[in-house]
Amino acid sequence: LTYIEQRGIIQYIEFRGIDQEEEEAAMKKRTMEHTELLVLSLLSQGDLYGYQMIVELERRSEHAFDMKEGTLYPILHGLERQGAVEAYEAEGPNGRVRKYYRLTKKGGKYLKDQREEWRSYSEAVNAVLRSCEAG
Amino acid sequence: MEYKRFGEWREAALNQVRYWPDHDAIGRELESHYEDHRDDLIRIGWPQEEAEAHALAALGDPEAVGKALDREHSPWLGRLFTVSRVALVITCFLYVSLIFSNDFDLTHFVNSFRPFSVKEAAGELRVEWYNEEAHPAYLGDCVATAGRGRAVQACDFTLTPVKALEWETYGAYRTLITIQVEWSPRYWGMEPTFDDELCVRYNGGEADNIRSRFGFYEHGGSYEPAWAHVHANSYSVRGFRNTALSVELATEEPAEWVELYYPYGDNDWTLRVELEAVE
């Protein structure tokens, strides 16, 4: 985006008067998309149930992700509805029946797209940061 | 609001989910998560009460979680899914009932194209009805036949003579004629009553229409007067009603032609089948 275009967007945003609530909703949406990507990445390693995913996310991110655990389930159910994952019930070692999630073919393709999108986005952000540091 | 027990938390979350058939499954999954977390904390030395409180707090706000779940378990999508499953079950049921109903009897359907088989060997003829053992009366020398006739329109019926055979047995003659009858769907529900009303005439006069093809002795054990038995098998094919009509005639003298007369309101019709003598 050129400077003028950016200005234009900023003015448009100001004109629309985006309030705190909308901003929070947008943030939530972004967080949800990222969580979807993380969940699908975990499932590409093997079948997991919800609690295992939370534990794995904490372990692999070195406790950087601090999400409310209950919010994982709407994301999982949404992915299941879209056909990106499928669920089945199985008994765990302690006899408790758990709902496991498995990545589907469609989910694998979705993960690939999301991963590429994330990489190009993070590369763009890094490029801006690097140029600012150098400048 | 502070939720001290998991049961309260779950109820608060599920209250937000409008599609109630999914409540059980969601509740079980959340409970399993909560118990796993609580048990892990106890295992590393947390006191039970604190472990429960921590595991519950980690789940987050039940109303927010419930609202998010509600979006994924939309009542409309759920109902649509339920309705489609019910529709599938009904369709399967109707399909199976159609196949096993009297209207679509597979045996009748197959037999309608081959209602009787005829074996001719060294001038001897053997007629077998619907895979049954041949009755002695259905064994004899073939004296006359008629091949497949062209389809003719008679009022609302399309009649196609399929085959006719005449043979000599016990010093008398039997004639078997099969006709394919198709009629317009406009007349669904008005099943023709060929069995009762079809009149069978031949060169010797009119035959008595008897109800049972084994009615020879009921008929007095005689071929005078001649008698006929009419048998109609109805079924549906691609929405059209069809009847495989079989007419059996027993006469003292050989039949040279047979006329089938059907009184159908103001539109009576007669179909004549000419038999050709076998040299």
Image: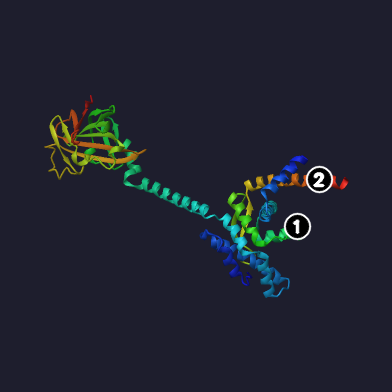
Looking at this rendering, what residue extends furthest in the front direction?
Answer: A15
In the rendered image, which quarter is residue B152 located in? top left
Residue linked to disc 1:
A60
* Residue in the picture at 55% in, 64% down: B15
- Classify residue A92 as left or right of residue B83: right
The chain that hosts pointer 1 is A
From the viewer's perspective, is residue B149 above or below residue B79? above
- Classify residue A53 as left or right of residue A81: right
In the rendered image, which quarter is residue B7 located in? bottom right
Q: Amino acid at mark 1?
A: Arg
* Tag nearer the camera, 1 or 2: 2
Task: Point out which mark residue A128 bears.
Answer: 2
Q: Secondary structure at mark 1?
A: helix
Q: Position of residue B151 (x, y in %)?
A: 29, 28
From the viewer's perspective, is residue B33 above or below residue B4? above
* Residue in the picture at 18% in, 34% down: B266
Does residue A74 show up? yes
On-image quarter of the C terminus of chain B: top left
For the residue pair B69 and B141, the one nearer the viewer reads as B69
From the viewer's perspective, is residue B248 above or below residue A89? above
Q: Residues within 10 Å of mark 1 (few under 14, many from 20)?
A: few
Q: Residues within 10 Å of mark 2 (few under 14, many from 20)?
A: few
Looking at this rendering, what residue extends furthest in the top direction?
Answer: B279
Q: Position of residue A124 (x, y in %)?
A: 78, 44
Q: Secondary structure at mark 2?
A: helix
Q: Position of residue B206 (x, y in %)?
A: 13, 34
For the residue pair B210 and A99, the one nearer the viewer reads as A99
Does residue A39 show up? no
The chain that hosts pointer 2 is A
Question: What color scheme is it?
Answer: rainbow
